[in-house]
Image: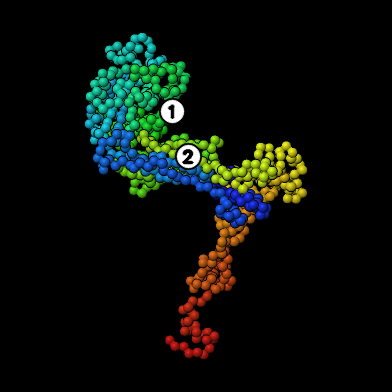
Amino acid sequence: QSCGECIQAGEKCGWCTDKDFLKQGEQKSTRCDEVEALIKKGCSEASIENPRGTVSVNKNQSLTDRTKDGVKLKPDQITQIQPQKLTLDLRSGEAQTFHLTFKRAEDYPIDLYYLMDLSYSMKDDLENVKNLGTDLMLEMQKITSDFRIGFGSFVEKTVMPYISTTPAKLLNPCTSDQNCTSPFSYKNVLSLTADGFQFNNLVSKQQISGNLDSPEGGFDAIMQVAVCANQIGWRNVTRLLVFSTDAGFHFAGDGKLGGIVLPNDGKCHLQDNMYTMSHYYDYPSIAHLVQKLSENNIQTIFAVTEEFQPVYQELKNLIPKSAVGTLSSDSGNVIKLIIDAYNSLSSEIILENSRLPEGVSISYISHCKNGVSEKGENGRKCSNISIGDQVTFEVAITAKGCPSNGKSETIKIKPLGFTEEVEIVLNFICECECHKGGIANSPVCHFGNGTLECGACRCNEGRIGRVCECSKDEVRTEDLDANCRMDNGTDICSNNGDCVCGTCECKKRDNPEERYSGKFCECDNFNCDRSNNKLCGGHGRCECRKCTCDANYTGSACDCSLDTSTCLASNKQICNGRGTCECGVCKCTDSKFQGPTCEICPTCPGVCTEHNPINKFQNPSYGNKGVTH
């Protein structure tokens, strides 16, 4: 085992670099052990490699306070999360903890895209949406001075059996007395704009279309809105998508009905603002939509009729940072619905991290308003956050071992629905500092057959043994097995290791804290007596299958306390002078006395009884002494 392998085994493991350490006795047959154990075995603290992890803050821009600044800032000038970049040096098994602070900025810009179902059943809804632009502008100006709005519409995939493909129905899918536009999958009618009148003008020109089946192709449209950032005009601000419909939805797999089997590729396919690949790619899955909406920081508001509330409530539970509102039959309440949903979404902060490298774990503790703290999944969230409120998250990152390439990794943490993120560079402590000072071909390693590194030999290719004294090609295992037995009747290396070059190399356990040791691997640190289901009662160390107890503890399982303070009676005597204190508990030697400190005597006469004049007079032991009343 090398020093690097040792420190990766667990956060408590240290390595003794003193090259003479192992010559001091067979009980010191390993340089890798808990630091305290190494010191007790005679390794000086200066000779112990025990690197620790660190947290460094690289970018720490202050949170924006708009009330103080009083200046209209651009979106990229607003800071809502702090710090913005950190570097962590991770030692295996040792958690590195840091704090992230979030504060909702006042007057934060908002982009809102209204995506509407234009199937025939939404005819009366379209009339009410035609004036949505200016009306919504007036309401949103109460929240932000920087608001933009856009509009898109969808119907269904333009293949059978979703629509009728007869020539007449392709021109007008409605009945002959209704003038409807040709069916389409998704159309970007208006990219995001600050001009509410332009919104009204373009939406007023829209026409209803039609399709055959009840569920609609809304998922195709949502995917395009999410991934076509340039065409839609999304800025790095709060992004809201309002999805308005009175029907259900098709999802991945339903495309087979129309002979479409290729999975949705999650890419933008808009030409002249029309989705051109609806006949080629299947509908996206819910999981795929969740991924793309999250990647693009889009918060979704499902404005649906009461009939489909249960369906979209279930969908909301699968899509973080989404909301559902009940749309009136003619969409007359759509503005109130949007405002309420936005307030609900913006008042909740949910932290999300990017994919973690193998062996790395992360945990959160939230410190929200009114002193409320949560752990686990709830540790990622804070609710009821108003503008100007500040909340803190305690984040702990732990690595188990080192990545195979040993290189740095970068992860990101961001509040869902916000464009700001925290960049975290992870460096892994995979080698000891003494590794850099290795002496190649050192004479200590059997005439230069290895590198003297951290007090031990790292053998060259083809060499084995503690000091590289053996060649793999020349060693005859059967001749050396005898050196690996405690006596002729025992197993090789106590059946806990392998005999290599006449020396036992002990097996590793799944739990890095558990180790075999000794010249013949006859010792271990996990097969000692237990008390209260704890090794050595939690008051000692397991060394070669025997407990070495901490001060003030004794016994085979270190479960006997030598502290006598628990045995003191009220008169400050140990066990009231009528017993002995054993393992912190009184053992009463006078059979009349009992209790935790031998102070209770049920059969003893009370003081009043003992001094009663009548009893004294009748008791011969008092003699003829006079009694006065």
Secondary structure beneath disc 1?
A: helix
Horizontal side of residue 176 vs 55, given as left or right? left
Q: Is residue 163 visible?
A: yes
Q: Residues within 10 Å of mark 2 (few under 14, many from 20)?
A: many
Name which residue lies at 35% across and 44% down: 391
Which one is earlier in the sequence, the residue at label 2 or at label 1? 1
Quarter-wise, where is residue 199 in the image? top left
Q: Position of residue 321 (x, y in %)?
A: 37, 34
Instruction: Give the label, 2 or 1, closer to the camera.
Output: 2
Asked if 179 appears above or below 14 in the picture, the reply is above
| Residue in front for this viewpoint, 531 or 97 | 97
Query: What numbered label is drawn on residue 86?
Result: none
Q: Which residue is mark 2?
A: 426
| Residue in front for this viewpoint, 626 or 92 | 92
Quarter-wise, where is residue 462 in the image? top right
Name which residue lies at 22% across and 31% down: 138
Q: Are marks 2 and 1 in contact (CB under 8 Å)?
A: no
| Residue in front for this viewpoint, 208 or 448 | 448
Name which residue lies at 31% across and 41% down: 64
Q: Position of residue 606 (x, y in %)?
A: 49, 76
Q: Assign the N terminus to one quadrant of the image.
A: top right
Q: Which residue is mark 1?
A: 288
Which residue is at the far top? 167
What amino acid type is highlighted by mark number 2?
Leu
What sort of colour scheme is used for the picture? rainbow
Spatial separation of the CA atoms under disc 2 and disc 1: 28 Å
| Residue in front for this viewpoint, 556 or 178 | 556
Q: Position of residue 264 (x, y in %)?
A: 44, 23
What amino acid type is highlighted by mark number 1?
His
Q: Assign the C terminus to one quadrant of the image.
A: bottom left
Q: Position of residue 292 (x, y in %)?
A: 41, 29
Secondary structure beneath disc 2?
A: strand
